[in-house]
C-alpha cells in the first residue's frame, strides 16, 4: 500500500502520462507556429517533470482530439528574423538551475580550449588528493596527541611519540607540497575556468530548440557548476539589498526566462547519465537564491542529488546512490517540506516556512525557435539586453564585454560584418566564405577561433598564434573603424565629413555623440571597450586599464590605421631591418604583453610629481615606446636577436601547454625574484617566457616586469634632445643609417664599422630574400586569378552572345598589363644579378 502524500503548499509533480500529453501539445503547437520544438525527451524529463500535477491540465487543450497548447499558455517573440516560442507556466520553485553562461560573470571564464579543460581535470584530481592528505594529516596529529598523553613505559612511549611526530611532520609537509601543486595549477588556468561549450541539442541528426553540454566526468561537472554558482553569488553581492530575504518576504515579482539544457555526466563506473534540466537564461541570481532557500546545491541539481540528502522516513540511506529523476527529486523536496510545515514546533527559519512564497514561480520557457543552431546566441543576446538595460549594478569588465557583443550583433544585423572584416584584411584568402555565427562566437570568446581562418592570407599557416592575431585585428577594426578620406580637404569650403558605413554602427551602438564632438573621454571609453574585448581571448587576463593611452582621439575619429601585413611578414621585415615592421609588430604584441602570466605592461604606475614618491612614472604607452625604440638602440644589453626571440615567445606564450624548462635542466626563477628563497618564489607555469640573452639564447630566468623595465627603461622611450637641430631632433625616433654623411651620423656619432655593416647585412639578407619570394608568389597567384577571371568572362560572353567591350577600354587594359609585364621582366634581370652577387658574399 502506497503511503499518502502529506498535504501542504509545496506541489507534487504529475505523472508520466500527462508528461507525454504535454510533449504532444508542444510538438503540435510548434508545427502550427512553424518553429522547431525541443527534443521530446527534454520536454518529458526537463519540463514536464518540473510542473505541478494540475499545471499541465491547465496548459493543454484537445480540439478535435489533437493535443495543443491553449492560446493563453504561450507567446511568440519575434526579434528581426529570429522567432522564439515561449511557454508561460508555474514551475516548482526548486526546479531551475542557474545558467553558468551568464554575462555578468563573463570575466570569471577563460576561452574554451582542450588544454584548459585538461588542466581543470588535473586541478580536480589535485584537490581530491589534497583533501585526502589533509584528512591523513589530521589523523596523524590525533595519533601524535594520543601517544603524547598515553601512560606506560617511558622508553616505549618516547619511541612511539617520536615515530608519531615524524609521521605527522611528513603528513604536514605533503599537504604543503600538494597545496603548492594546486596553486600552480590554478595559476596555469589564470585563476579562472574555461567557459563550458554549449551547442544545440540534436534529435535524429537535426538541431532542436534546446542546448547540451559536452560529456564531462562527474567530479569535473560538480567542480565547474560549483565554480559558476560561486562566481554568480559574488557578482550578486553588488546589489543594494538581500535577494534571498526579498524572495522569502515577497516572493518572485518578475518572470524569468528558461531554456532546456542537457548535462552529460560520465559516472565513475564509465556509464554516461544524460540529465535534462531547465536553466535560467534571465534571472540567474533569483534561480540561485531560490535553491539556497530550498536548501538544494546547484551542482547536485544538475548532476544528481545524493539520496542521503533527501531520504524519506523509514527509508534506508545509501550515500552512493544519486537521484537523477527531476520528478523524484522535487517530490521528495515537497514531501519533506510539507511534513515539516505541518508540525507546530517548526522554526520560522526552517526551509518549509521560508520557501512558502516561492513554492511555485511564474516563468517563461523556450519551447521552440526557427533557428535552433543559433539558439545559444539568441538567448545570450537576450540576457545581455536584459542586463544592460536593467537597474542592477554591472561589473565594468563584464559590462564592456556585453557591450562589445552587442556591437558585433549590430554589424551583423546591418549586414556589414563581412564588409568590415574584408576591408580590414585585404589579403584574406576568402572573406566572403566567413561563417558569421562562428565569427561572432570567436570574437566574443564563446567558441574557437577556427571560423576566422578565411581571413588568413594565402600561403600562411592558420596556427593559433595567427588566428589570435587576426581576432585582435578584427576587434580593433570593429571598435575603431576606418572612415573615408576628407574629400573637401584644402578647398576652403565647409563640408560635412563622410564617416562611411561603419562608424555610424559604432556611434549608434555605443550611443556616442557626433563625429565632430569626439574627445579624449570618448577615446578612453572606446579603448576600455577594446581592451575588455581583447582580454577575453587570453587565458591569463590582466587589467584592462593597461591599454589606456594606446588609442587617442585621432584613432577614434579616423580609424585604427592598422598595418595590413601578416605576422609572418612583420617578423621577416623586422629580421630584415625594417623599423616600420618592428613598430607594427610591437603594436601586435601589446595584448600579449598585458595578458601574460607575468604581465609586462600594467596600468600607469609611479608618480607624476616625482620619482621619490612612488617611483619612476611609467604608462602603458611608455612601455610600448621603449620597446619600439629598442630596435634602433645602441645599448649593448639589447640586440636584434634578443628582440626577435622575445617577440616570438610573447606571441606564442598563450598556447603553451607545459611550463618552460631550462636548457641545462636547472631551476628557473622569475628575474625579479632571483635573490629570494626558493619557498618564496612564484611557481613557474605554462605561458611564462624565458629571458633571452643578446644572442637570442635562453637563460636561467623567466621574464617579468622587472626584467622588462630594466631592459627597456623609461629613458629609452623619451625624445632625444638634439641642440644642433638635425632632422631627427625632438621626435625620439632614430635616424636611418642611410641618412648618415661621410664622416658622422646625424647625431654626431661615428659611422658604423664596415665589418659590423657586413655582419648586419648577412643577418638581414636571408629574411629579405624570403620577403621577396613571398611577394613574387602573391604576384603569381594574382596573375593566375586574373587569367581565370578573364577566361570566365570570355566564356560567359560567348555563351550569352554579348557584344564586345569598346576598343578604347580593351586597349587601356592591355597597356596596363604590358607595363606590368615589362616591370616583371626587368625584375627578373635584377634577380639574376642578385643570384650572381650571392656567390660573391
Image (tube, rainbow, N blue to C red):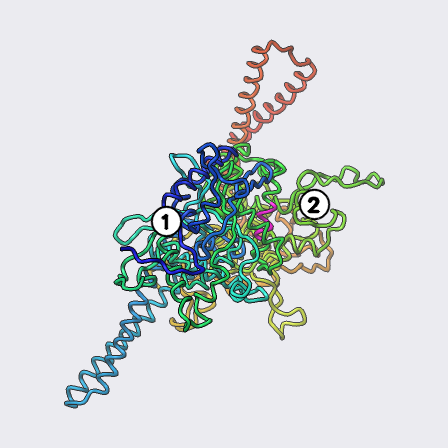
Which quadrant is home to the N terminus?
Answer: bottom left
- Where are the magenta residues, as a range? 401-407
* Observer-nearest of 638 and 327: 327
State yes or no: residue 279 in magenta: no
> x, y percentage for residue 127?
34, 63
Res 200 visible: yes
Q: Quadrant of residue 394?
A: bottom right
* Observer-nearest of 425 and 364: 364
Nearer the N terminus, badge 2 or badge 1?
A: 1
> x, y percentage for residue 598?
48, 61
> x, y percentage for residue 616?
61, 68
Disc 1 crowd rating (10 Å Cα; few below 14, some 14-19, many 20+) is many
* Observer-nearest of 427 and 503: 503
Seen from this angle, which residue lies furthest top? Answer: 801
Q: How many marks?
A: 2
> For the residues carrying marks 2 and 1, which lies nearer the camera in this image?
1
> In the rendered structure, are the residues bearing label 2 and label 1 in contact, judged by CB atoms less than 8 Å apart?
no
Res 761 visible: no
Q: Which residue position holds label 2? A: 558
Residue occupying the point 54% across, 44% down? 570
Q: Quadrant of residue 249?
A: bottom right
- Magenta stretch: dominant secondary structure: helix
Label 1 SS: strand
State yes or no: residue 403 in magenta: yes
In the image, residue 489 sits, relative to residue 726, either above or below, namely: above
Q: Which residue position holds label 1? A: 275
Residue occupying the point 37% across, 60% down? 6
Disc 2 crowd rating (10 Å Cα; few below 14, some 14-19, many 20+) is some
Label 2 SS: helix
* Observer-nearest of 837 and 594: 594
The Cα atoms of the two marked residues, 2 and 1, are separated by: 52 Å
> x, y percentage for residue 620?
60, 59
Amino acid at each position: 500500500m502506497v503511503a499518502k502524500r502529506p498535504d501542504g503548499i509545496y506541489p507534487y509533480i504529475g505523472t508520466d502520462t500527462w508528461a507525454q500529453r504535454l510533449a504532444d501539445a508542444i510538438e503540435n503547437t510548434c508545427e502550427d507556429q512553424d518553429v522547431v520544438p525541443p527534443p521530446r525527451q527534454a520536454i518529458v524529463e526537463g519540463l514536464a517533470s518540473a510542473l505541478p500535477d494540475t499545471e499541465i491540465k491547465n496548459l493543454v487543450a484537445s480540439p478535435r482530439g489533437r493535443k495543443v497548447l491553449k492560446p493563453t499558455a504561450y507567446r511568440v517573440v519575434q526579434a528581426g528574423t529570429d522567432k522564439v516560442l515561449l511557454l508561460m507556466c508555474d514551475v516548482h520553485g526548486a526546479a531551475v538551475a542557474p545558467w553558468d553562461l551568464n554575462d555578468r560573470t563573463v570575466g570569471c571564464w577563460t576561452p574554451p580550449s582542450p588544454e584548459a579543460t585538461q588542466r581543470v581535470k588535473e586541478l580536480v584530481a589535485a584537490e581530491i588528493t589534497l583533501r585526502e592528505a589533509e584528512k591523513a594529516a589530521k589523523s596523524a596529529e590525533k595519533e601524535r596527541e594520543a601517544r603524547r598523553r598515553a601512560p606506560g613505559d617511558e622508553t616505549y612511549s618516547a619511541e612511539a611519540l617520536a615515530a608519531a611526530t615524524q609521521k605527522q611532520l611528513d603528513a604536514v609537509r605533503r599537504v604543503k607540497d600538494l597545496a603548492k601543486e594546486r596553486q600552480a595549477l590554478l595559476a596555469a588556468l589564470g585563476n579562472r575556468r574555461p567557459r563550458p561549450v554549449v551547442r544545440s541539442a540534436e534529435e535524429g541528426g537535426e538541431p532542436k530548440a534546446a542546448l547540451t553540454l559536452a560529456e564531462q566526468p562527474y567530479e569535473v561537472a560538480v567542480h565547474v557548476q560549483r565554480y559558476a554558482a560561486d562566481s554568480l553569488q559574488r557578482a550578486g553581492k553588488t546589489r543594494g539589498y538581500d535577494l534571498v530575504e526579498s524572495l522569502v518576504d515577497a516572493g518572485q515579482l518578475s518572470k524569468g526566462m528558461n531554456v532546456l539544457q542537457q548535462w552529460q555526466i560520465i559516472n565513475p563506473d564509465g556509464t554516461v547519465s544524460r540529465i535534462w534540466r531547465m536553466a535560467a537564461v534571465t534571472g540567474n541570481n533569483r534561480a540561485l537564491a531560490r535553491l539556497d532557500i530550498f536548501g538544494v546545491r546547484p551542482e547536485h541539481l544538475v548532476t544528481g542529488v545524493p539520496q542521503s540528502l533527501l531520504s524519506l522516513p523509514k527509508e534506508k540511506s545509501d550515500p552512493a546512490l544519486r537521484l537523477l529523476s527531476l520528478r523524484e527529486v522535487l517530490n521528495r523536496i515537497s514531501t519533506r517540506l510539507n511534513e515539516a510545515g505541518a508540525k507546530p514546533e517548526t522554526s520560522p527559519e526552517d526551509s518549509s516556512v521560508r520557501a512558502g512564497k516561492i513554492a511555485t514561480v511564474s516563468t517563461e520557457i523556450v519551447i521552440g525557435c526557427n533557428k535552433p543552431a543559433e539558439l545559444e546566441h539568441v538567448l545570450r543576446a537576450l540576457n545581455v539586453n536584459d542586463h544592460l538595460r536593467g537597474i542592477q549594478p554591472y561589473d565594468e569588465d563584464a559590462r564592456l564585454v556585453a557591450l562589445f557583443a552587442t556591437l558585433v550583433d549590430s554589424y551583423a544585423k546591418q549586414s556589414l560584418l563581412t564588409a568590415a572584416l574584408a576591408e580590414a584584411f585585404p589579403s584574406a584568402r576568402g572573406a566572403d566564405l566567413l561563417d558569421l555565427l562562428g565569427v561572432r562566437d570567436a570574437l566574443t570568446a564563446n567558441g574557437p577561433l577556427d571560423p576566422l581562418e578565411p581571413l588568413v592570407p594565402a600561403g600562411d599557416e592558420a596556427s593559433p598564434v595567427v588566428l589570435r592575431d587576426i581576432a585582435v585585428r578584427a576587434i580593433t577594426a570593429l571598435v575603431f573603424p576606418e572612415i573615408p578620406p576628407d574629400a573637401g580637404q584644402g578647398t576652403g569650403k565647409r563640408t560635412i565629413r563622410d564617416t562611411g558605413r561603419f562608424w555610424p554602427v559604432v556611434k549608434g551602438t555605443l550611443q556616442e555623440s557626433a563625429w565632430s564632438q569626439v574627445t579624449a573621454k570618448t577615446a578612453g571609453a572606446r579603448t576600455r571597450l577594446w581592451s575588455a574585448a581583447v582580454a577575453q581571448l587570453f587565458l591569463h587576463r590582466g587589467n584592462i586599464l593597461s591599454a589606456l593611452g594606446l588609442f587617442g582621439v585621432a584613432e577614434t575619429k579616423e580609424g585604427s590605421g592598422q598595418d595590413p601585413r601578416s605576422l609572418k611578414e612583420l617578423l621577416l621585415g623586422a629580421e630584415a631591418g625594417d623599423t616600420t615592421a618592428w613598430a607594427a609588430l610591437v603594436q601586435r604584441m601589446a595584448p600579449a604583453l598585458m595578458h601574460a602570466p607575468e604581465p609586462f605592461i600594467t596600468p600607469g604606475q609611479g608618480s607624476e610629481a616625482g620619482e621619490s614618491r612612488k617611483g619612476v612614472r611609467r604608462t602603458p604607452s611608455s612601455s610600448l615606446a621603449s620597446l619600439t625604440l629598442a630596435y634602433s638602440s645602441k645599448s649593448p644589453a639589447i640586440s636584434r636577436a634578443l628582440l626577435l626571440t622575445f617577440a616570438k615567445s610573447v606571441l606564442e606564450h598563450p598556447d603553451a601547454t607545459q611550463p618552460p624548462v631550462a636548457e641545462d635542466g636547472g631551476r628557473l626563477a622569475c628575474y625579479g625574484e632571483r635573490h629570494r628563497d626558493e619557498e618564496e618564489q612564484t611557481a613557474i607555469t605554462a605561458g611564462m617566457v624565458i629571458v633571452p640573452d643578446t644572442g637570442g639564447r635562453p637563460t636561467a630566468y623567466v621574464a617579468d616586469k622587472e626584467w622588462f623595465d630594466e631592459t627597456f627603461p623609461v629613458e629609452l622611450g623619451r625624445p632625444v634632445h638634439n641642440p644642433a637641430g638635425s632632422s631627427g631632433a625632438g621626435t625620439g625616433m632614430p635616424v636611418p643609417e642611410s641618412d648618415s654623411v661621410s664622416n658622422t651620423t646625424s647625431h654626431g656619432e661615428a659611422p658604423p664599422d664596415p665589418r659590423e655593416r657586413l655582419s648586419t647585412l648577412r643577418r638581414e639578407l636571408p629574411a629579405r630574400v624570403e620577403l621577396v619570394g613571398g611577394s613574387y608568389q602573391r604576384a603569381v597567384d594574382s596573375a593566375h586569378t586574373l587569367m581565370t577571371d578573364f577566361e570566365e568572362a570570355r566564356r560567359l560572353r560567348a555563351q550569352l552572345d554579348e557584344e564586345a567591350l569598346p576598343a578604347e577600354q580593351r586597349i587601356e587594359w592591355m597597356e596596363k598589363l604590358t607595363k606590368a609585364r615589362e616591370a616583371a621582366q626587368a625584375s627578373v634581370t635584377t634577380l639574376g644579378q642578385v643570384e650572381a652577387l650571392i656567390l660573391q658574399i
